[in-house]
């Protein structure tokens, strides 16, 4: 019983330390519009494409290769998109705010409002590309993009707002792991757009999950070895 309690305590410690990690620093290169999904107040509607570098571990991916043409959504209209390599923070979150590197620490984001980012991620998960350009469609790119921009302080027009569909911030349930990509605004650098991007949680193990599993296996192995020694 004591060994089981010790194991449980150790696993809890591993989980809490993994989730407390700070946002990850990497690079974002904006690649442009994914498709011609429409225009809002003179700006192209998302989603967009970007190359992401340095975030693989946080995304639960092995290796250090650049993730080319990753899908991102702009949530920060006033600042420009930077087509050159730009250093960014990545803040991770899911519907349950525990468990992955950087999760719950929104201090590097523009608004530092976890609920707002969760609502934005929920809205993006409703996106149906087959509805783009379809009259009367609800969750198409133009309506989602316009709603996102206005959620974060813009005042664009020419779309049907989806704000009325948003769940309460504390009632959001997400399917994917989400990441806020925020320009680190180093000295002398122009402030660039903030983005949201996601990785399916069903296919990408969280870093803390691997840490938790590895530590658990080690502790179990130690316990079994001690049992053999005592029984010898």
Image: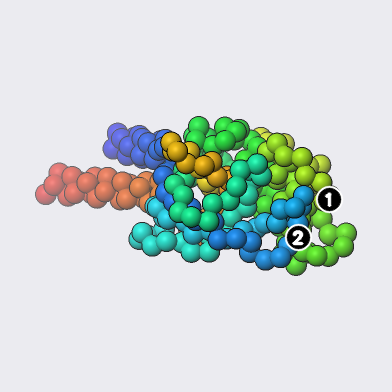
Is residue 186 at all visible to an observer of this figure? yes
The quarter of the displayed image where residue 10 is located: top left
As displayed, is residue 117 above or below residue 38?
A: above
Q: Nearer the viewer, residue 161 or 61?
A: 161
Q: Is residue 213 left or right of residue 102?
A: left
Within 10 Å of the Cα at label 1, are there few (<14), some (14-19), or many (20+) other Cα atoms? few
Could you tell me residue 58's position as x and y percent? 43, 49
Decide: marks 2, 1 in contact (CB < 8 A)? no
Q: Secondary structure at mark 2?
A: loop
**Circle 1 sits on which residue?**
158
Front one among 54 and 32:
32
- Please identify the quadrant where the N terminus is shown: top left
Pick the front one: 151 or 60? 151
Residue 38, disc? 2
Q: Position of residue 120 (x, y in %)?
A: 67, 44
- In three-dimensional space, the C-alpha distance between marks 2 and 1, rounded to whole angstroms, equals 10 Å
Looking at the image, residue 201 sits to the left or right of residue 135; the answer is left
Mark 2: give few (<14), some (14-19) or many (20+) Cα within 10 Å: some
Report the residue at 70% width, 44% height from top. Answer: 149
Q: Earlier in the sequence, mark 2 or mark 1?
A: 2
Q: Using the image, determine if residue 39 lies above or below residue 211.
A: below
Nearer-the-camera pick, 14 or 77: 77
């Amino acid at each position: 019983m004591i060994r089981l309690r010790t194991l449980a305590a150790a696993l809890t410690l591993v989980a809490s330390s993994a989730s407390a990690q700070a946002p990850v620093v990497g690079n974002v290169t904006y690649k442009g519009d994914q498709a011609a999904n429409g225009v809002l107040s003179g700006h192209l509607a998302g989603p967009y494409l970007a190359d992401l570098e340095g975030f693989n571990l946080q995304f639960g991916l092995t290796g250090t290769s650049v993730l080319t043409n990753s899908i991102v959504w702009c949530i920060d209209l006033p600042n420009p998109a930077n087509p050159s390599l730009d250093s960014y923070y990545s803040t991770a979150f899911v519907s349950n705010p525990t468990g992955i590197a950087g999760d719950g620490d929104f201090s590097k984001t523009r608004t530092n409002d976890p609920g707002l980012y969760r609502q934005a991620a929920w809205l993006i998960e409703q996106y149906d590309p087959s509805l783009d350009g379809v009259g009367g469609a609800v969750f198409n790119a133009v309506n989602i993009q316009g709603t996102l921009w206005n959620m974060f302080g813009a005042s664009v027009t020419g779309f049907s707002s989806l704000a009325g569909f948003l769940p309460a911030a504390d009632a959001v349930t997400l399917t994917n792991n989400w990441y806020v990509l925020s320009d680190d605004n180093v000295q002398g650098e122009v402030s660039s757009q903030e983005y949201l991007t996601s990785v399916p949680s069903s296919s990408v193990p969280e870093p803390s999950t691997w840490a938790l599993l590895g530590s658990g296996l080690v502790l179990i192995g130690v316990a079994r070895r001690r049992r053999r020694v005592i029984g010898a």
